[in-house]
Image (cartoon, rainbow, N blue to C red):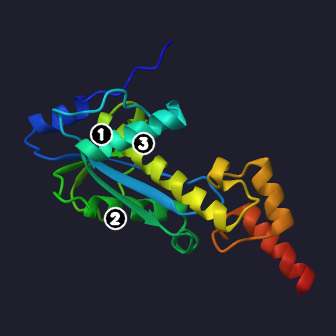
Amino acid sequence: MPRSAPDFGFEEAAFAQGALCVAGVDEVGRGPLAGPVTAAAVVLDARAIPDGLNDSKQLTHIRRTELAEAIHATAQVSIAHASVEEIDALNILQASCLAMRRALVGLAVPPDLALIDGNRVPQGLPCEAQPIVKGDSKSLSISAASIVAKVCRDRIMVGLAQQHPGYGWEQNAGYPTPQHLEALRNLGVTPHHRRSYKPVHNILYQEKSVTG
């Protein structure tokens, strides 16, 4: 059975209730062992929605990149991050929420409503919010946010890969692939690794045990 494409129904329902500005919010990068977690907030122009928006995971790299450019050209976009240090200090869930808050606050026009991908609303948002499970495959605004967040974070990881070759970040974006795990064991932990994540923590603990 084919997947249904996201539509503008959630946004139109909010407009019908009196909202003037509705943002879609999504984050990427909870699972990687390295790099920031990245969130995007996108307010689409209903008259200029790029064709082909979908959950970023359902798109090819080339198509994601093309759509990200189209979204930046036609919509209000704000992208924000939570750092590796913040992830380790707060935990990944709270760091993801922090990145979402920052993305919403960064919008030029404060939204009346944020449509959030997932099953919970982060605390401290600057507006009302509605969680939507699998929202990146249901809401066009959330799918747009998922696309620009992923393209942005992937580019960050490509840049970090040039500083720290061998971990494969230009391909794996910091996720725990076999290549990445082997490089961790052979090359060690970089400043961009999340020390609270078990594979990284275990290697640091082993190093401490050997040198202690």
The CA distance from mark 3 to mark 2 is: 17 Å
Q: Is residue 4 above or below residue 190?
A: above
Where residue 9 appears, as percent x and y from the top left, is 23, 28
The CA distance from mark 1 to mark 2 is: 17 Å
Amino acid under disc 3 = Ile
* Mark earlier in primary sequence (1, 2): 2
As drawn, the label of residue 147 is 3
Amino acid under disc 2 = Arg
Amino acid under disc 1 = Ser
Q: Which part of the image, by quadrant, shows the C terminus?
A: bottom right
* Mark earlier in primary sequence (3, 1): 1
Residue at 67%, 71% (x, y): give it. 195
**Residue at the farthest right position:** 210
Residue at 24%, 30% (x, y): give it. 8
Where residue 169 appears, as percent x and y from the top left, is 66, 55
The CA distance from mark 3 to mark 1 is: 10 Å
Q: Which residue is mark 2?
A: 102
Q: Which residue is mark 1?
A: 141
